Image (cartoon, rainbow, N blue to C red):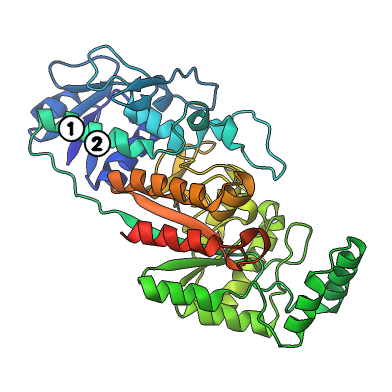
């Protein structure tokens, strides 16, 4: 156990130390404001305050962990031992920056509460982030900082040995549209054919007819392939199903479709499943509740996992709705336009509600890379996509982190601009499991 002396045990202090020590290093931490208790303790102990008490292991504190409210922070990013750091502290501090304040800033997504211009999907843009602007978005920077923290503590307390982590890979699949042509209903099918005719895009029409007549498999029905790959490489997967009412940004299969329900039930026998909350439900708790209830009714079990459709996050409101409806784990923490680590870490961590100044029960699982990011946003050729995936995996493996990838059943259809992208999917799995 680590005893921490500080002049004020604020909610932010408690959260930052609990995440870095307890959550990430599997090491218990206790706090005190009593100097006498701190001096008398003969175990691992550090002080986190403005000035050292004596010759103890001292970390000079930045004011952000003792503040209330959200204000613009003056941040200067510098390089140290090959990594970027900020909230620099030079006076007698064991590290040249406040790792706890910097970790809190990234984990709490502090910058996303500050004024910013959202992208066309109402999301915080990756290019607005501190990590992107300073070139460390692709790196799970907190894990690299933690390695230095452990070394500093061990120099003072050689018996300090946190529980070792092991690299972990989690494969996730978003099912926005289970089928391309099937189960769309008469109006949507006729409308799609008319749209193809008006756009002089005649190629899909014969294929659609063959699929509807049962002479060809629906191109988005890649689920047998996905299960075969899972069996071949022996890994775990999580699938997130969209069960929205039809809308402008929610064009999934209707949840009452027997074929769709049968698919969900079948997949739930082989993988973990979660809800893929719709675009519309992001601002409507009633709709979100309906979608969760629909999935629970289909799989006949409690739903505790989620990932937002379009990765739409509106902090803290999106997460508050999930918490209110019993969701315990969310997998939305990542960017659509760029690969990397939105919160500076690959490891799961609890959501801190900055408005309420409290740690919540919602565990956030950051993902590192999404198929659409590589192909549609970055427009990478196959070889370059694989190179970038390997780079990310290597970073995570170096710090024994968690590598989460995000794919869609439809992007593995091997058609049109997704031709040959199964190669990237399998390469990702092979490199992660190597």
The part of the image, by quadrant, that contains residue 235 is bottom left
- x then y, percent, for residue 341: 46, 42
Lateral position of residue 134 relative to residue 35, left or right:
right
Q: Is residue 212 above or below residue 275?
A: below
Image quadrant in which the N terminus is located: top left
Q: Disc number at residue 147?
A: 2
Could you tell me which secondary element the residue under label 2 belongs to? helix
Image quadrant in which the C terminus is located: bottom left
In the picture of the structure, the residue carrying the numbered disc 1 is 151
| Spatial separation of the CA atoms under disc 1 and disc 2 | 6 Å
Of residue 356 and residue 297, the one placed in the foreground of this image is 297
Q: In this view, does 129 lie above or below 418?
A: above
Lateral position of residue 27 relative to residue 268, left or right:
left
Of residue 112 and residue 64, the one placed in the foreground of this image is 112
- x then y, percent, for residue 401: 33, 49
- x then y, percent, for residue 14: 34, 36
- The residue at the far bottom in this view is 214
Could you tell me which secondary element the residue under label 1 belongs to? helix
Q: Is residue 243 above or below residue 59?
A: below
- x then y, percent, for residue 307: 55, 57
**Residue under the point 68% across and 32% down:** 117
Q: Is residue 300 above or below residue 133?
A: below
Marks 1 & 2, CB-CB < 8 Å contact: yes
Of residue 52 and residue 156, the one placed in the foreground of this image is 156
**Residue under the point 19% across and 49% down:** 163
């Amino acid at each position: 156990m680590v005893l921490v002396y500080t002049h004020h045990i604020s909610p932010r202090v408690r959260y930052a130390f609990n995440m870095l020590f307890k959550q990430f290093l599997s090491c218990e931490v206790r706090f005190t404001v009593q100097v006498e208790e701190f001096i008398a303790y003969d175990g691992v102990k550090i002080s986190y305050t403005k000035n050292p008490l004596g010759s103890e292991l001292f970390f000079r504190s930045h004011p952000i962990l003792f503040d209330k409210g959200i204000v613009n922070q003056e941040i200067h990013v510098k390089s140290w031992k090959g990594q970027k750091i900020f909230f620099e502290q030079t006076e007698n501090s064991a590290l040249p920056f406040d790792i706890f304040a910097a970790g809190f800033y990234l984990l709490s997504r502090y910058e996303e509460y500050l004024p910013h211009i959202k992208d066309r999907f109402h999301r915080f843009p990756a290019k607005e982030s501190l990590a992107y602007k300073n070139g460390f978005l692709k790196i799970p920077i907190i894990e690299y900082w933690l390695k230095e923290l452990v070394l500093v503590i061990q120099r003072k307390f050689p018996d300090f040995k946190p529980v070792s982590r092991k690299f972990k890979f989690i494969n996730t699949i978003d099912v926005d549209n289970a089928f391309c042509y099937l189960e769309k209903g008469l109006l949507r099918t006729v409308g799609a054919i008319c749209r193809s005719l008006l756009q002089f895009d005649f190629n899909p029409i014969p294929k659609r007819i063959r699929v509807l007549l049962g002479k060809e498999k629906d191109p988005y029905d890649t689920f047998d392939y996905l299960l075969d790959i899972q069996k071949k490489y022996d890994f775990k997967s999580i699938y997130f199903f969209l069960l929205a009412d039809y809308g402008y940004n929610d064009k999934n299969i209707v949840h009452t479709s027997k074929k769709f329900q049968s698919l969900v039930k079948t997949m739930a026998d082989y993988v973990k499943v979660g809800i893929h909350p719709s675009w519309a439900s992001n601002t409507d708790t009633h709709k979100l509740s309906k979608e969760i209830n629909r999935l629970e009714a289909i799989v006949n079990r409690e739903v505790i996992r989620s990932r937002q459709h379009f990765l739409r996050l509106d902090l803290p409101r999106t997460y508050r709705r999930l918490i209110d409806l019993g969701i315990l784990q969310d997998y939305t923490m990542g960017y659509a336009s760029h690969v990397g680590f939105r919160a500076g870490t690959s490891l799961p961590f609890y959501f801190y509600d900055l408005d309420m100044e409290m740690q919540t029960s919602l565990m956030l699982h950051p993902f590192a890379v999404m198929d659409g990011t590589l192909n549609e946003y970055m427009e990478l050729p196959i070889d370059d996509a694989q190179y970038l995936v390997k780079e990310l995996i290597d970073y995570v493996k170096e710090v024994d982190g968690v590598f989460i990838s995000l794919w869609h059943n439809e992007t593995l259809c091997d058609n049109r601009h997704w031709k040959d992208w199964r190669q990237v999917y399998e390469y990702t799995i092979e490199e992660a499991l190597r």
